[in-house]
Amino acid sequence: MIYPIVLFGDPVLKKKAKDIPQGEDVKELVQDMFDTMYSASGVGLAAPQIGKSIRLFVVDDNPMMEEGETGIKKAFINPEIIEEDGEDWAFEEGCLSIPGIRADVDRPEVVKIKYFDEDWNEHVEEFDDIHARVIQHEYDHIEGVLFTDYLTPFKKRLLKGKLANISKGKVDADYRVKVPSKK
């Protein structure tokens, strides 16, 4: 099943997500999230982006790899970042929930993360470079943080109108989106 992507302005994107009860069958949801991510040409997707406030995200950064490099394709369930290390480096990020907006974000170059896979096997792994960045971006989603939260007040002011339009559904996205409901 391909879910619509929740747009900027929806409260689910700013909420800290809840752990998934250990052992719960999440295989179908993980597959649906990969399908949704691929249909939107993304390299990562967190459960809050499909309206589910649970600690789950999927990553497949293979489209970002240079020839001869191998990406990662994984589901991260109830992840916990143990350590971030290395120099902060800037890279232009975008987000399926904030279509049409990209900005440089500084992040540490290495991340060590503990998580479960879709079979509930526990892993502790270290990722670097672009892999670390994609994981950190998706991890932020389950913490209720968006990449726009890292921008300077000046840059946020410049984007204010565009972000307001996105929250009203005035977007040019080539995938299904869900407009935040009016309170």
Image: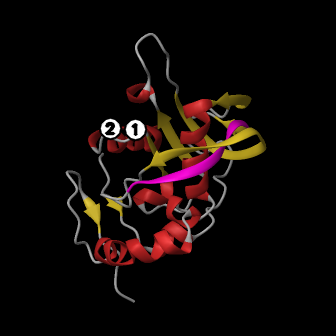
Say left or right for 82 vs 104: right
Q: Which residue is mark 1?
A: 34
Say left or right for 119 vs 111: left
Q: How many marks?
A: 2
As drawn, the residue found furthest toward the top would be: 68
Residue 22 within the segment the image draws in magenta: no
What span is colored magenta in the figure?
102-112
The x, y position of residue 78, in whole percent, is 67, 47
Q: Indicate the amino acid at tag 2.
A: Tyr
Q: State the residue in front, 60 or 27.
A: 60
Q: Going 32% across and 72% down the picture, which residue do you hit?
A: 162
The overriding secondary structure of the stretch rendered in magenta is strand
Task: Give the answer, above or below, for where 102 lies relative to 35.
Answer: below
Q: Is residue 80 visible?
A: yes
Say left or right for 76 vs 12: right
The x, y position of residue 1, in whole percent, is 30, 45
Image marks 1 and 2: residues in contact by CB distance under 8 Å: yes
Task: Give the answer, above or below, for where 44 lies relative to 175.
Answer: above
Q: How is the image coloured?
A: secondary structure
As drawn, the residue found furthest toward the bottom would be: 183
Mark closer to the observer (1, 2): 2
Q: State the residue in front, 12 or 148.
A: 148
Q: Going 40% across and 69% down the picture, which residue do you hit?
A: 8
The x, y position of residue 146, in whole percent, is 53, 62
The mark found on residue 74 in the picture is: none
Label 1 packing within 10 angstroms: few (<14), some (14-19), many (20+): many
Q: Which residue is mark 2?
A: 38
